[in-house]
Amino acid sequence: VKQLARAAERNPRINCFTHLYSNSDVASQLDRSRAKGKGKGRLEEVTVGVKDMFATADDAPTSCASKMLKDYRSPFDATVVKRLRDAGAVLVGKTNMDEFGMGSSTTNSIFGRTINPCGPRGADGQSESKAEQRVAGGSSGGSAAAVAAGLCDIALASDTGGSTRLPSSFCGIYGLKPSYGLLSRHGLVSYASSLDTVGVMGREVEGVWGAFDVMNAYDPKDPTSVPTHVRDRARKAHQPLVERLGEQNGREKPLEGVRVGVPADLFPSALFPSALLSSPSTLSPIRTYLSTLLTLGASLHPVRLPTTPLALSTYYVLASAEASSNLARFDGVRFGYRAEEGEAEGKEGLYARTRTEGFGEEVRKRILLGTFALSAEAFDNYFLQAQRVRRLIQLDLDSLFRISNPLHTSPSSPFLTSPSAPSASHRAQKGIDLLIHPTAFSTAPLLTPPSSSATKHASREPYIQDLLSLPASLAGLPAVSVPAGRAEDGWPVGVTVVGQWGGEEGLGRVVGAVE
Ligand code: GLN
């Protein structure tokens, strides 16, 4: 098992795995995969890294990179893990992450920080001096670094507010966040349930979409899993574009007739004219990507997304509120860490000490913020207001597309009665098929920024990096970060392509044509 040996050798430096499976375990997985026989196992011998937020019923703990679950072992496989195994995939390790998915740099982890292996001097993570090391992005930074370094073929990630796309951009790989509700979250530890999605990473489009197809099925064990008849409706709605792309495949202009929206509001120079982040511009690889689209026959159209600046605060109110509720289950009684019992302190005292000791600083901060947003005096101004703004952002995005959201085509849908919903003829003439924007404001930031100690607590910078990913998260739309080349500093740059709900197939064909 070649990759496993390399992973064992390289992991101490990159720190992308929290657990590597033993040689004998991987060998027996391989045997099972081969025994399945040809044809059946669509992912035969494909090696997978699994974010340590997915339950696996084996030797590996499911830790969420938290002291709270450090030694927790799951009695069952997450549905997506099971589907990958059934198709013949082989798990090589569990990957590092920000604790419970909270963060954008894989630095909030009890296992330590993941180091980005994709510097200008080759994908080995060996060449930079300590001061030059960069973050892998987060929260699925371990998955991205493992894939980028070639230590596994694909990786499972999660994406609540950019956690698949941002690290993919920083590590120069493909990272797909599918439409909300398509991939089962049964066995993915909950962070913010109205936003959580299962992400897939890989070095090629084919690998990512192959794994997505295997996992894409209704699961009765996930109450938010979209039922089969709605999936069928979405497939029909997207069929014209998919067919067209199929017919044009292999021609000189395979993307003829594809309308791509370019939203100025999601380009860093529009959001922060004074160049908020002082790192080298990521725009030149993105320009090249746009002109490749043109060469292949697509047309580009300027569009507006005026609600963009509201996405960051909306997201952090909603995600924290939902997290405070979801993480209430970690009380020291049912699973995971339990503080030493103090004398005569009672149950409440035990819960409180367990949670204070078991959760890291960022997680405690989110729980406190979220609990406040849900409290009686703040509920209307924070939580409800954020829900309303979320709906505006959803409508804002929906109105751009050629087809309306297939999830909302019943006559009672509030989408249809919205005053901002465009008419069918307007959509047919002016609507776009895809939206394109930079994934991040910059290449990967330094692991230890020079000013870190002074500004650590006050800095909003790590949160601001999420902004460009958030509209698609809040609207539940499919989005993929695509490697677009390298910036002047030699580090990777990602560009994100967003589709209408359920549009994964067309999205894959378009980014595949550019690849
Ligand atoms: N930076 C985001 C957060 O901390 C990313 C979350 C995610 O997608 N898991 O909430």
Image: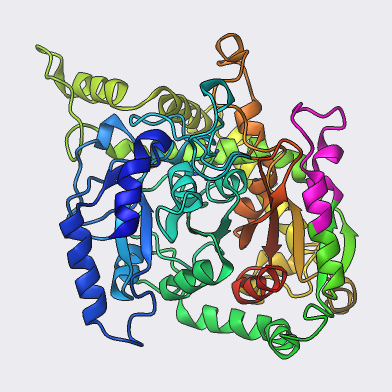
Q: Quadrant of the N terminus?
A: bottom left
* Residue occupying image coordinates x 18% and y 59%: 25
* Above or below, comparing residue 509 to residue 498 in the picture: below
Q: Position of residue 429 (x, y in %)?
A: 90, 77
Foreground pick, 440 / 382: 440
* Above or below, comparing residue 127 to residue 165 in the picture: above
Foreground pick, 163 / 377: 163
How many labels, in total?
A: 0
Q: Magenta stretch: residue 283 in it?
A: yes
* Residue occupying image coordinates x 69% and y 55%: 496
* Residue occupying image coordinates x 45% and y 51%: 193
Evaluate whether residue 260 shows in this view: no
* Above or below, comparing residue 456 to residue 283 in the picture: above
Within the image, what quadrant is residue 433 found in?
A: bottom right
Q: Is residue 130 left or right of residue 340?
A: right
Q: Is residue 136 left or right of residue 243?
A: left
Residue range of the region highlighted in magenta in the rendering? 264-288
Q: Position of residue 397 (x, y in %)?
A: 74, 58
